[in-house]
């Protein structure tokens, strides 16, 4: 062949991404059938590379490849014509070759030809004794070779090759792992996931430059991985901007993680997209045939996500972290049923006392969840998850309705206390939030002034314009408003004078140290003084000792709550506790 023709042939072969891929049952079926047709023990689907003959599928043949110069399949591929060699030992070109030395005498091969006429290899059968091939046998061999090419085209063109990157896609990754599991069941391998960019980066890039530039980034990354992995190893385009591949067999995990991290840092520095996207890598060891591909990809994604949120270039999959995220997802899924089940969600109440008189003047309503299978779920675990989901509106509605119902019940029993409860940032973005709160209070015949809504500074700052509208509407309704966890947000006192607030709750992280730290005490004193100057009532959270309560009283703090006074209690226990305090 001329150099130009050989170059075109090799390009066609490389574009099919077959070289170096694992054995496949879909191809093995064809080679087994070829053996049966000829009644011979050996057959192979042979691909003609630059200097070797590589076997995509083989029956009875041990080596995965042989030198191209000693392979009859090379001539079949070059000429795109079938060949029969009745006795290799009598053939001048092959009598001294590897096949004869291994005891093979007969050869018959049919070419594997692409749609554009390029010969990429051959389907061949071999035997230990000289013989001829019948017309019927060769016709069947040609049919089987055509079936091989049909399978190649199916895998390449129909749902197996990504059109942007030109790499095998997730479906091919799944198929190849299944094939690897058949050849090495239970074998341990290390998978790698390259995540090009986070969602925000991609959205900004596409918004400014357009999706064609995102495609350009994907192509650039795909070309880089082809170069780094070489022709022997395959990379897979498993999602829009994620690629997966397997580390070499026998790779040591920690050493490979360090090597990959160093390579990624180097690639970042040289990448034309380094100011647009931050690439991270997740690693996950797994066992062939034991770990499902979908679980492997999920674990890889989890590791890459941990790398991104933790600011590390590479992270190894952690079963513990993965289990935590799966538990969070389960809680989120189960919360809808919890709202409809009175046996799961309930309110408990932590008293708030007036520091001057030590009398209980109110309580904070706190949500508790008893899961039917997981048991008691702490609020610190489930509330942040729910607040950032579509359940946020329903959760707050449940809490307000339950609190209003309890207020009405206590009032009928002659118990006059106010209730405070927390709302989230999502609630302040609801344009009808204040209206709905008014409807709930009216339904239970509760005076709005008996209810206090607590929110953090960060919740208000998410969208100050819309939040201010809702806060003003709530204040006009008569509901009291409180800044919760004061001092931990980024707005601090700057926004207090603009907001229709009535109460400031100083976060417990400041309160717990005031007995031992004079600077902490001065800071809390300044918070209290400035808040009172703005006409706000001050509540200290997390009071756990008598000394702390006394210091706060001396600093002119008006109210407090914490374990020193009482822990959160069930509604049935609150009335007896209140009566005991009044005695």
Image: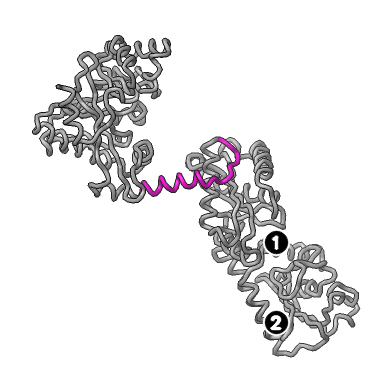
In percent of width and height, residue 135 lies at: 72, 90
Q: Nearer the viewer, mark 2 or mark 1?
A: 2
The N terminus - image quarter: bottom right
Please say whether residue 330 is one of the residues in the magenta stretch: yes
Please say whether residue 309 is one of the residues in the magenta stretch: no
Looking at the magenta stretch, what is its main secondary structure? helix
Q: Residue 582, located in which quarter of the rendered image?
A: top left
Is residue 265 placed above or below 40 in the rendered structure? above
Residue at 41% x, 45% y is 328
Residue 123 appears anywhere in the view: yes
Q: Residues within 10 Å of mark 1 (few under 14, many from 20)?
A: some
Residue under numbered circle 2: 35
Q: Residue 479, located in which quarter of the rendered image?
A: top left
In percent of width and height, residue 576 lies at: 17, 30
Residue under numbered circle 1: 20
Please report the bounds of the magenta region as a residue range.
311-332
In percent of width and height, residue 248 lies at: 69, 53
């Amino acid at each position: 062949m001329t150099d130009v023709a050989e170059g075109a042939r090799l390009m066609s072969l490389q574009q099919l991404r077959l070289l170096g891929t694992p054995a496949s049952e879909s191809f093995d079926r064809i080679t087994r059938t070829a053996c049966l047709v000829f009644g011979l023990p050996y057959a192979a689907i042979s691909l003609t590379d630059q200097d070797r003959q590589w076997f995509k599928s083989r029956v009875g043949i041990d080596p995965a490849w042989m030198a191209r110069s000693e392979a009859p399949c090379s001539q079949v591929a070059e000429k795109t014509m079938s060949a029969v060699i009745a006795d290799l030992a009598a053939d001048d070109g092959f009598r001294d070759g590897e096949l004869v030395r291994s005891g093979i005498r007969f050869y018959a091969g049919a070419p594997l030809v692409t749609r554009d006429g390029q010969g990429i290899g051959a389907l061949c059968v071999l035997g230990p004794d000289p013989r001829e091939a019948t017309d019927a046998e060769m016709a069947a061999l040609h049919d089987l070779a055509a079936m091989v090419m049909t399978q190649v085209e199916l895998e390449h063109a129909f749902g197996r090759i990504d059109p942007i990157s030109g790499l095998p896609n997730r479906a091919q990754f799944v198929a190849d792992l299944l094939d690897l599991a058949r050849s090495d069941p239970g074998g341990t391998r290390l998978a790698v996931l390259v995540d090009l960019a986070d969602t925000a980066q991609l959205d900004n890039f596409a918004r400014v430059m357009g999706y064609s530039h995102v495609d350009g980034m994907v192509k650039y990354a795909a070309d880089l991985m082809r170069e780094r992995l070489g022709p022997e190893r395959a990379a897979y385009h498993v999602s829009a901007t994620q690629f997966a591949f397997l580390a070499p067999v026998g790779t040591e995990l920690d050493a490979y993680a360090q090597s990959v991290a160093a390579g990624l840092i180097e690639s970042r520095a040289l990448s034309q997209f380094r100011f647009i996207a931050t690439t991270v890598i997740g690693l996950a060891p797994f066992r062939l045939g034991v770990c499902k591909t979908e679980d492997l990809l999920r674990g890889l994604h989890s590791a890459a996500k941990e790398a991104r949120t933790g600011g590390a270039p590479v992270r190894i999959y952690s079963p513990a972290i993965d289990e935590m995220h799966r538990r969070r997802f389960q809680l989120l899924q189960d919360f809808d049923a919890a709202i409809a089940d009175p046996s799961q969600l309930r309110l408990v109440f932590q008293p708030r006392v007036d520091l001057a008189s030590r009398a209980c003047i109110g309580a904070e309503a706190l949500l508790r969840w008893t899961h039917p299978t997981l048991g008691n779920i702490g609020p610190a675990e489930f509330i942040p998850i729910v607040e950032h989901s579509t359940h946020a509106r329903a959760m707050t509605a449940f809490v307000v309705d339950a609190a209003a119902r309890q207020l009405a019940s206590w009032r009928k029993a002659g118990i006059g206390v106010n209730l405070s409860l927390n709302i989230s940032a999502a609630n302040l973005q609801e344009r009808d939030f204040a209206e709905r709160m008014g409807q709930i209070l009216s339904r239970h015949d509760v005076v709005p002034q008996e209810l206090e809504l607590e929110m953090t500074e960060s919740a208000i700052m998410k969208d100050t314009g819309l939040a201010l509208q809702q806060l003003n509407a709530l204040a006009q309704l008569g509901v009291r408003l409180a800044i919760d966890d004061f001092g931990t947000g980024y707005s601090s006192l700057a926004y207090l004078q603009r907001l229709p607030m009535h109460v400031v709750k100083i976060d417990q992280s400041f309160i717990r140290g005031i007995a031992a730290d004079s600077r902490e005490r001065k800071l809390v004193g300044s918070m209290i003084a400035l808040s009172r100057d703005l006409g706000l009532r001050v509540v200290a959270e997390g009071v756990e000792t008598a000394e702390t309560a006394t210091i706060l009283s001396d600093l002119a703090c008006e109210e407090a709550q914490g374990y020193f006074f009482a822990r959160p209690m069930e509604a049935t226990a609150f009335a007896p506790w209140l009566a005991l305090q009044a005695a």
